[in-house]
Image (cartoon, grey):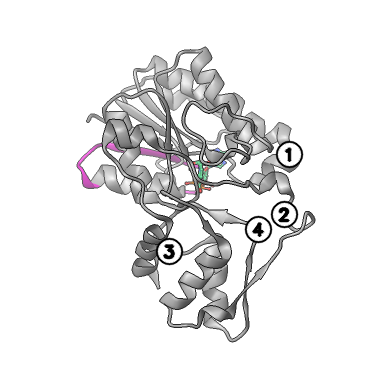
């Protein structure tokens, strides 16, 4: 593969991808908003000049405002970044000859149907999912050379977010509280990166799903972590999240995606949730 571009190279997925590409000897450019970035780029006030010459075989679109609450609370400002300017960038990259991978989400579904497949009808319940769906529709409308990779909950090298909260709580003496009305279907950033690279190398288009083979309740996941660090599972207590704590539109009923296409066409079998978490805990606990 020739040179590649990762838009949002400091993101969880983008940094895993950058490591893999460089380890494979692929010339890799990454954009960032951070100080000292080799290729500074801000989707809120974009300067597309650096992209005008093209020259990348593949581009991975990782940059986005990924906070669901931020999208819900500021739909206009976040759409400007996540939809309008992202589409403009993708059109320019396509004109320069890059094949793209765009990272979408299971949040394009309403969580009612269990494990929706790639051809299931999207019906987002929140603004984040609606913004991702808007990009998916623009890709079809402009016939852009893009693989749309819908992913579930990505985990990195160490526990972050709610997993990090449980880990810190487990280091203390008190109970570990986990929501009994939330579940996750985790997938490792490294596995997402490997799949994205295969999609780009094969110049695949269309919609692809990737996540775990099942989903796991937060309480079960927290108990699994407790046992891994030598703590009794009974330290984990379930708590039902209220509407005030996390609005139901930000809580999906079924987090699992059916991943038939990657299994059938690429021979990749999604891992069970416990295996994904066990690998994460083995790396970091
Ligand atoms: N993580 C998941 O569980 C998950 C699940 C489904 C889909 N996805 C999608 O996968 C992609 C990667 O997710 P991630 O979790 O790896 O992302 P992340 O770690 O949350 O990082 C977000 C990235 O977006 C960049 N960004 C934010 N606002 C920007 C702006 N105005 N201009 C340019 N860059 C901006 C950030 O740059 P700075 O470093 O400069 O802040 C950062 O690189 C995203 O599109 C996300 O929606 C993620």
Q: Which residue is mark 3?
A: 158
Camera-side mark, 4 or 2: 4
Badge 3: few (under 14), some or many (20 or more) residues near its Cα, within 10 Å? some
User: Of marks 4 and 2, which one's residue comes earlier in the chain?
Assistant: 4
C-alpha separation, residue under disc 3 versus residue under disc 2: 24 Å
Image quarter where the N terminus lies is top left
Look at the picture and state if 199 lies above or below 163: above
User: Of marks 4 and 3, which one's residue comes earlier in the chain?
Assistant: 3
Front residue of 193/91: it is 193
User: Of marks 3 and 2, which one's residue comes earlier in the chain?
Assistant: 3
Q: Which residue is mark 1?
A: 74
SS at badge 3? loop
Front residue of 232/246: it is 232
Q: Which mark is residue 246?
A: 2
Camera-side mark, 1 or 2: 2
> Residue drawn 55% across and 20% down?
137
User: Of marks 1 and 2, which one's residue comes earlier in the chain?
Assistant: 1
Camera-side mark, 3 or 2: 2
Q: Is residue 264 left or right of residue 48?
A: left
């Amino acid at each position: 593969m020739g040179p590649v571009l990762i838009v949002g190279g400091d993101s969880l997925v983008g940094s895993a991808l950058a490591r893999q590409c460089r380890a494979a000897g692929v010339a890799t450019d990454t954009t960032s908003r951070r100080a000292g970035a080799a290729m500074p780029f801000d989707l809120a006030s974009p300067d597309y000049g650096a992209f005008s010459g093209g020259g990348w075989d593949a581009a991975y679109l990782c940059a986005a405002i990924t906070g669901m609450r931020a999208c819900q609370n500021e739909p206009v400002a976040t759409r400007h970044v996540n939809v309008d300017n992202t589409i403009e960038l993708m059109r320019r990259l396509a004109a320069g000859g890059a094949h793209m991978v765009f990272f979408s989400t299971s949040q394009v579904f309403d969580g009612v149907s269990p494990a929706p497949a790639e051809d299931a009808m999207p019906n987002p319940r929140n603004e984040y999912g609606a913004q991702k769906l808007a990009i998916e529709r623009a890709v079809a409308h402009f016939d852009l050379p893009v693989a749309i990779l819908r992913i579930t909950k990505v985990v990195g090298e160490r526990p972050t977010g709610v997993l990090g909260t449980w880990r810190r709580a487990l280091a203390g003496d008190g109970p570990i509280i986990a929501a009994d009305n939330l579940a996750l279907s985790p997938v490792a950033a490294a596995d997402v990166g490997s799949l994205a690279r295969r999609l780009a190398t094969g110049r695949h288009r269309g919609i692809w799903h990737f996540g775990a083979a099942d989903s796991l309740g937060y309480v079960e996941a927290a108990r699994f972590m407790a046992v891994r660090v030598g703590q009794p599972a009974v330290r984990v207590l379930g708590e039902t999240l209220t509407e005030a704590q996390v609005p139901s539109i930000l809580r999906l009923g079924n987090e699992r995606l059916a991943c038939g296409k990657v299994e059938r066409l690429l021979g990749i079998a999604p891992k069970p949730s416990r295996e994904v978490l066990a690998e994460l805990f083995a790396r970091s606990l």
